[in-house]
Image (spheres, rainbow, N blue to C red):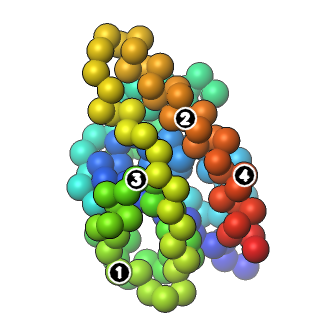
């Protein structure tokens, strides 16, 4: 049986969607095929890599991907983690279930490294706290 595909979508695919992808893979890699992408991809933020490394989750080899890379790929669930991605979400077939839960953008936090990393940790923890609700919702 093929695994159901989850696509986590954000604007830059640099922070929130990358952390959600890493956390979801860690939690349920044997159950779902998890990917992330952005409507305007950029780079994977080093603070996101650091925040997940603290949980022994390695996303250092991840790259920021465009949602266009998933055109024609059957996606079962799309989780948008920012309002901009929800508003600019490309068309997915009716079989794809769209779920939205916005998180603060830690990439927008300014300050020294510790301040920025703290913002990434906070959002990481919010995503980690939300994911059981998301998984329960998609399991029906």
> Is label 3 in a helix, a strand or a loop?
loop
Q: Which mark is residue 91?
A: 1
From the viewer's perspective, is 116 left or right of 34? left
Which of pointers 2 and 4 lies earlier in the amino acid sequence? 2
Which residue is label 4 attached to? 132
Q: Do residues under tags 3 and 2 come within 8 Å of each other at their CB atoms? A: no
Q: Are marks 3 and 4 in contact (CB under 8 Å)?
A: no
Q: Residue at x 56, y 59 (%)?
A: 34
- Residue located 66% across and 59% down the image: 134
Please, what secondary structure does the residue beneath circle 2 have? helix
Across and down, in percent, residue 79 comes to: 51, 62
Q: Is residue 83 above or below residue 71?
A: above
Which residue does the numbered mark 3 point to in the structure image? 82
Looking at marks 1 and 3 on the same chain, the residue that comes earlier in the sequence is marked by 3
Q: Is residue 135 left or right of residue 70?
A: right
Q: Along the polypeptide, which appears first: circle 3 or circle 2? A: 3
Circle 2 packing at 10 Å, graded few (<14), some (14-19), many (20+), is: many
- Determine whether the residue tagged by mark 1 lies in a helix, strand or loop: loop
Label 1 or label 4, whichever comes before in sequence order: 1
Q: Is residue 95 above or below residue 133?
A: below
């Amino acid at each position: 049986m093929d695994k159901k595909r989850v696509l986590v979508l954000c604007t830059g695919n640099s922070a929130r969607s990358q952390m959600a992808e890493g956390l979801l893979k860690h939690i349920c890699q044997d159950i779902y095929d998890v990917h992330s992408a952005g409507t305007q991809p950029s780079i994977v933020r080093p603070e996101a890599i650091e925040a997940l490394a603290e949980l022994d989750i390695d996303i250092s080899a991840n790259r920021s991907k465009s949602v266009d890379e998933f055109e024609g790929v059957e996606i079962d669930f799309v989780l948008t983690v920012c309002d901009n991605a929800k508003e600019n979400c490309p068309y997915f077939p009716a079989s794809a279930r769209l779920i939205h839960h916005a998180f603060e953008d830690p990439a927008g936090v300014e300050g020294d490294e510790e301040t920025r990393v703290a913002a990434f940790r906070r959002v990481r923890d919010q995503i980690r706290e939300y994911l059981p609700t998301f998984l329960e919702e998609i399991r029906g």
